[in-house]
Image (cartoon, rainbow, N blue to C red):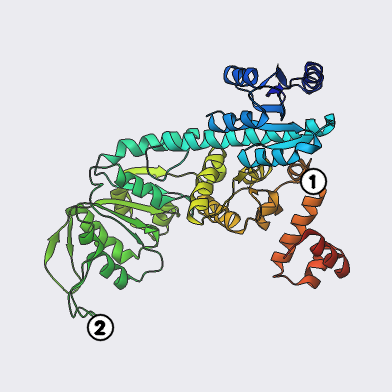
Amino acid sequence: MSKAKLLIIEDELAHAEALAEAMEGEGYIVFTAGNGSEGLAIFNRKDPDVIVTDLKLGGDIDGLDVVKSIVKSSHNCEVIMITAHSSIENCKVALREGAYDFIEKPIDLDLLRAVVARAVQKMTLTDENRQLHDRLEKKFDFKGIIGEAPIMLKILDKLQRSANSDIPVLLEGETGVGKEVFAEAIHSNSPRKSKPFLAVNCAGLSESLLESELFGHTKGAFTGATEDRLGFFEKADGGTLFLDEIGDMPLTMQAKLLRVLEDQNITRVGSTERIKVDVRFISATNQNLLSDITDKKFREDLYYRIRGVNIEIPPLRDRREDIPMLVEHFFRLFIQSEKRKVKGITPAALRALKTYNWPGNVREMRNTIKTMVVLATNEMLDIADLPFEIHATVNDEEALSNLAGVNLDELEKAAIQKTLELVDGNREKAAKMLGIGERTLYRKIREYDLK
């Protein structure tokens, strides 16, 4: 981050100027202060990204006081302490108070540059995560739907305009795009939101079972029918009924459904009594129903009855702009539900997630982020935490870019740990996969304190 702002607080003027000159050479915007009071005043005016302060400042406010003041403020800023060897214990106190790191005198400028760069990177990542959080909190009022890609904004507008009506809605899209979430969003923003929302998946259900599920049955209607039972149409009365995978519905059931949709009356299995129902109907499919009509697998009259409003939900690969927001949403969801102390996702890992094609769409992403959070061993989710299938599809150039600048020991440690997990701890297999001898692997396991 070449234009990051840096504040140096140092009571020795010549020392402060030397540090400022060195850091300006790295592209930072640098301010200097000769004492703690002046430093806090500049902090409030200039809002720097990183502060480098001496622990001993020769006034009423020392470096530790500076740290405490910064932590209490609403600014996103990292503090690096400078200290003599004799005051290291005080610097450890500063770390507990919220300082980012400390450097001993005499200062190694290369070390200072590296520590400041890491602090800026952390600050930048924190800012990006907060911005994503703010956008998630205030941008979307349709429950569960996250997206700002142009195609998604058009869909959200269509959903909003159709929510207040009782017109049937047909949702089309690949498996995993979140069709039920969209259906529930329509219901939650409709006048029926205080009434039931019920979902039925038609896939794999026989005609008799599906008829009983939808319309209910009377006692004795068939073997095992020991009592009267309400169907989903009656249970959803006044609310919304969502039929998923409607393309899998048997043809004879399609005819029965068409009659119900036309007159809003159902007849329970085993009865002749017609029961009036008031239901908003939403359906979904991952099939091409027009092709099914041509192949005599789906009724044309039913198709035009359920297709009052047609909404095609795009696959995740066609709205990559939404991936960072979805990742952030699922990350926050699972660090809370799984009670994990993971702080964020590195830019390298996020780039890989954005590059991946997501054949399983949002559902696959949800499961991926949950797995990464549950299995995380560090405070940041990184490249090493990605599942194998994502590693395998990242192109070589992207992979090399992600690895650039990463500590080699950390890469080796992560590679060994993930390989051991992959083979359930079998060291012989792990050594073969890594291309090293078992004795070398044993030594590396001890060296890195791996399980």
C-alpha gap between disc 1 and disc 2:
68 Å
**Within 10 angstroms of label 2, few (less than 14), some, or many (20 or more) residues?**
few
Q: Nearer the viewer, residue 136 or 47?
A: 47
Image side of residue 385 versus residue 433, left or right: left
Residue pointed to by mark 2: 223
Quarter of the rendering occupied by the C terminus: bottom right
Closer to the chain start, of discs 1 and 2, is 2
The percent position of residue 426, horizontal first and vertical second, equals: 75, 72
Per the image, the residue denoted by label 1 is: 407
- Quadrant position of residue 218: bottom left
Who's the residue at 22% across and 61% down the image?
235
Dot 1 amino acid type: Asn
Quadrant of residue 415 in the image?
Answer: bottom right
Please tell me which residue lies in front, 203 or 362.
Answer: 362
Residue 387 is left or right of residue 399, and the answer is left
Q: Residues within 10 Å of mark 1 (few under 14, many from 20)?
A: few
